[in-house]
Image (spheres, rainbow, N blue to C red):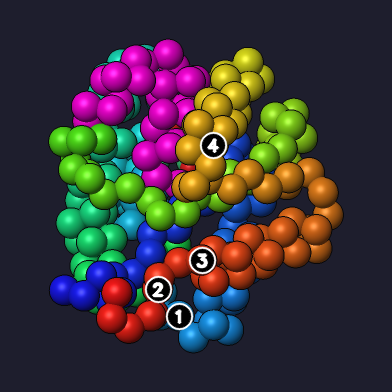
């Protein structure tokens, strides 16, 4: 297949309450305006089986969840999602906008829970081979602000019940990963007004589109 026919894989990350949903809507609107075919999906989830795994992962429960169990369930859901949704869409030339992906595993299971990054990298290779997001937006906000927003809208799930220090480690991990690979990551200050966040997103997307080979014939 001609490389210019392969869609781009965009992921959106951040701690709870950072405004992912609203900003993903904005990104989709931007793609629509550019006439770029795309799908919108999320992790954990994105297929019926992966959504069932999501329910198991997010429900608060009495039983302590072993960190390897949680890690493997994240990657089990991801394997299904990749096979059923993400890879077929990219192969059709569509862009995939995904609410969280493996960066969340590094941040939550690695940074938050303390699972070794090497272990996560091994599963990443097993499940994804060389597939990685082309572009990742890290919506960044001080953890206390994000959690206050998240708590005001619904009953906390199993992750939202974690302590502030857990989310500080999650945030640090996102920022560290972003700093290490500036070609892939764009950190957006999500503590500013929604208009400000979306102006930044539009500028970064414009820059990305003009620098990427997408849609150009003969590449
Ligand atoms: P959401 O609330 O953004 O939909 O995400 C569900 C929760 O799952 C969120 O607290 C982050 C967590 N999560 C992980 O811990 N590891 C992962 O790999 C993913 C994708 C999500």
Of the 4 image quadrants, the one containing the N terminus is bottom left
Q: Residues within 10 Å of mark 3 (few under 14, many from 20)?
A: few
In which quadrant is the C terminus drawn?
Answer: bottom left
What kind of element bears circle 2? Answer: loop
**Residue linked to disc 3:** 211
Could you tell me what secondary structure mostly forms the magenta stretch?
helix
Find the magenta span and give its range: 98-123
Mark toward the start of the polypeptide (2 vs 1): 1
Q: CB under 8 Å between callouts 2 and 1?
A: yes
Residue at the image position 26 percent from the left and 49 percent from the top: 131
The CA distance from mark 2 to mark 1 is 10 Å
Ligand 1 image position (quadrant)? top left
Q: Separation of disc 4 and disc 2 at Cα? A: 23 Å
Q: Position of residue 12 (x, y in %)?
A: 52, 51
Instruction: State the residue at coordinates (75%, 64%).
Output: 199
Circle nearer the N terminus (1, 4): 1
Image spot of residue 33 (x, y percent):
58, 84
Tag 2 and tag 3, C-beta contact below 8 Å = no
Check the image and report above or below for 207 versus 178: below
Instruction: Write down the residue under mark 1.
Output: 36
Badge 2 is on which residue? 214
CA separation in Å, label 3 and label 1: 15 Å
Q: Which labelled disc corresponds to residue 178?
A: 4
Give the image location of residue 211, x and y in percent.
Answer: 51, 66
Q: Residue 218: image x %, image y %?
A: 28, 81
What SS does tag 4 mark? helix
**Distance between the Cα atoms at labels 4 and 3?**
19 Å
Evaluate if marks 1 and 4 touch, with contact meaning CB atoms under 8 Å apart. no
């Amino acid at each position: 297949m001609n490389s210019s026919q392969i869609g781009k894989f965009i992921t959106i990350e951040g701690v709870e309450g950072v405004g992912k949903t609203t900003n993903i809507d904005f990104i989709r609107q931007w793609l629509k305006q550019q006439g770029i075919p795309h799908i919108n999906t999320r992790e954990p989830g994105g297929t019926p089986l992966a959504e069932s795994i999501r329910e198991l992962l997010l429900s608060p429960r009495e039983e302590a969840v072993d960190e390897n169990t949680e890690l493997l369930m994240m990657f089990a859901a991801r394997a299904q999602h990749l096979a059923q949704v993400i890879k077929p869409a990219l192969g059709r030339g569509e862009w995939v906008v995904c609410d969280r992906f493996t960066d969340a595993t590094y941040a939550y299971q690695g940074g938050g829970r303390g699972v070794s990054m090497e272990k996560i990298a091994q599963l990443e290779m097993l499940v994804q081979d060389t597939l990685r997001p082309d572009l990742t937006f890290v919506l960044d906000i001080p953890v206390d602000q994000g959690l206050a927003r998240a708590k005001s809208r619904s009953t906390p799930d199993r992750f939202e019940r974690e302590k502030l220090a857990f989310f500080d480690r999650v945030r640090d991990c996102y920022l560290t990963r972003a700093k290490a690979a500036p070609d892939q990551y764009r950190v957006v200050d999500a503590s500013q007004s929604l208009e400000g966040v979306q102006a930044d997103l539009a500028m970064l997307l414009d820059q990305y589109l003009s620098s990427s080979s997408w849609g150009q014939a003969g590449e």
